[in-house]
Amino acid sequence: TPPPTPPPTAPPAPAATISIQCPGELPVFETVVCDIVTTNTASGSWSVPGVAAGTFPLDVVNGPNSIFLETIDATAIGERFTLRVTVTGTNGAQVSANHSFTVVE
């Protein structure tokens, strides 16, 4: 008799993706909206080192996330900062994306 056929293996989970739509300039004393879209993610967070203290969670289950960035420090004009988004995919792998912006008048 032939050996039993092994059960089919499940295909690997697709990799997580991140898309950041955000202006390249952040006018001082104004608020800009950045949209973060993720797919195939289990969890996520965002941060802007040098602007906001800490890391903030993303709601990766309920679609796109809109975050609001603002600076009230006129001495930051001309400085460049980076929005960093990190997610954990449904396959367990971490993926990161960055978006840089400059503070302007």
Image (spheres, rainbow, N blue to C red):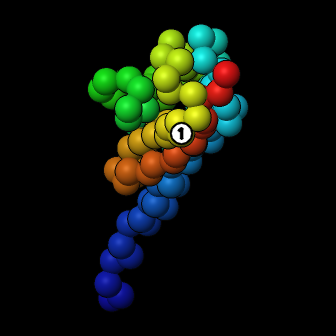
Question: Tag 1: Cα neighbours inside 10 Å, few (<14), some, or many (≥20)?
Answer: some
Query: In terms of depth relative to the viewer, which is nearer, 3 or 20?
Result: 20
- Callout 1 amino acid: Arg
Residue 75, horizontal then vertical, whole percent: 49, 23
Residue wearing tag 1: 80
Which image quarter holds the N terminus? bottom left
Horizontal relation, residue 21 to residue 97: left or right: right
Residue 39, horizontal then vertical, whole percent: 56, 40
82 lies above or below 12:
above
Q: Residue at x 59, y 11 (%)?
A: 29
Residue 97, horizontal then vertical, whole percent: 51, 47
**Res. 26 visible in picture:** yes
**Res. 45 visible in picture:** no
Q: Residue at x 43, y 32 (%)?
A: 48
* Residue furthest out toward the bottom: 1
Question: Which image quadrant is residue 32 in?
Answer: top right
Horizontal relation, residue 82 to residue 55: left or right: right
Q: Secondary structure at mark 1?
A: strand
Q: Residue at x 38, y 23 (%)?
A: 52
Query: In terms of depth relative to the viewer, which is nearer, 67 or 38?
Result: 67
Query: In terms of depth relative to the viewer, which is nearer, 92 or 94?
Result: 94
Residue 80, horizontal then vertical, whole percent: 53, 39
Query: In terms of depth relative to the viewer, which is nearer, 49 or 11?
Result: 49
